[in-house]
Image (cartoon, helix red, strand yellow):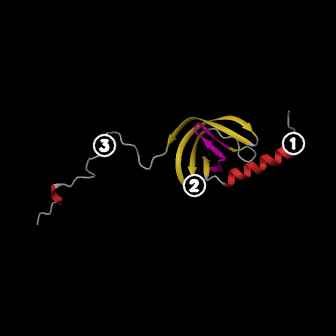
């Protein structure tokens, strides 16, 4: 048994679904100077609204509100039901601090005081 849904009804259902996804999601993709809402994210990619977001490519940044999540190299995957899906070729998690180029022991001192700071009076 097959169910036939008129195109106008399917379009209305897709539009309502997309509106629901946009309202409950704080994720954003930054492409250059432009910022677009992310509809969904999964382990290997994300989707945006096909109708309002131009074709994205290359290096983008993903944010949850103002928190930088990752920098990603993306490739377009497929368009379906009003969503444009992108897959990660690479996704690098954003860090609060610059990476160290040497090993730092967990119990290492935070800083060292020189002998001129020992209080010679």
Task: Tell me if residue 102 comes above or below residue 15 in the rendering.
Answer: above
Closer to the camera in the image, 103 or 17: 17
**Residue 7 — which label?**
1
Q: Is residue 32 visible?
A: no
When asked about the image quadrant of residue 77, the answer is top right
Q: Which residue is mark 3?
A: 104
Dominant secondary structure of the residues highlighted in magenta in the image: strand
- Location of residue 50 by image quarter: top right
Q: Earlier in the sequence, mark 1 or mark 2?
A: 1
The residue sitting at 53% across, 47% down in the picture is 69
Please state the horizontal and vertical placement of residue 29, each as a whole percent of the image: 61, 47
Per the image, is 86 magenta? no
- Give how far across and how far down residue 1 sits, in percent: 86, 33
Q: Residues within 10 Å of mark 1 (few under 14, many from 20)?
A: few
Count the marks: how many? 3
Q: Earlier in the sequence, mark 3 or mark 1?
A: 1
**Which mark is in front, 3 or 1?**
1
Distance from Cα at disc 2 to Cα at disc 3: 32 Å
Foreground of the two, 107 or 57 = 107
Magenta range: 31-47
Bin the neighbour count of mark 2 within 10 Å (Cα to Cα): few under 14, some 14-19, many 20 and up.
Answer: few
Residue 38, numbered label: none
Q: Is residue 35 magenta?
A: yes
In the rendered image, which residue does mark 2 sit on?
65
Specify whether residue 96 is in view.
Answer: yes
Q: Which residue: 44% across, 50% down?
A: 96
Q: CA distance from mark 1 to mark 2?
A: 35 Å
């Amino acid at each position: 048994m097959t169910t036939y849904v008129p195109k106008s009804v399917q379009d209305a259902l897709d539009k309502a679904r997309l509106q629901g996804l946009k309202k409950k999601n704080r994720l954003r993709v930054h492409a250059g100077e432009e910022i677009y809402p992310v509809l969904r994210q999964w382990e290997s990619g994300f989707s945006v609204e096909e109708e309002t977001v131009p074709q994205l490519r290359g290096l983008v940044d993903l944010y949850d509100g103002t928190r930088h999540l990752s920098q990603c190299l993306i490739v377009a995957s497929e368009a379906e039901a009003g969503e444009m899906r992108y897959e990660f070729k690479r996704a690098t998690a954003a860090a609060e601090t610059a990476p160290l180029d040497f090993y730092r022991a967990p119990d290492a001192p935070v800083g060292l005081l020189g002998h001129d700071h020992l209080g010679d009076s």
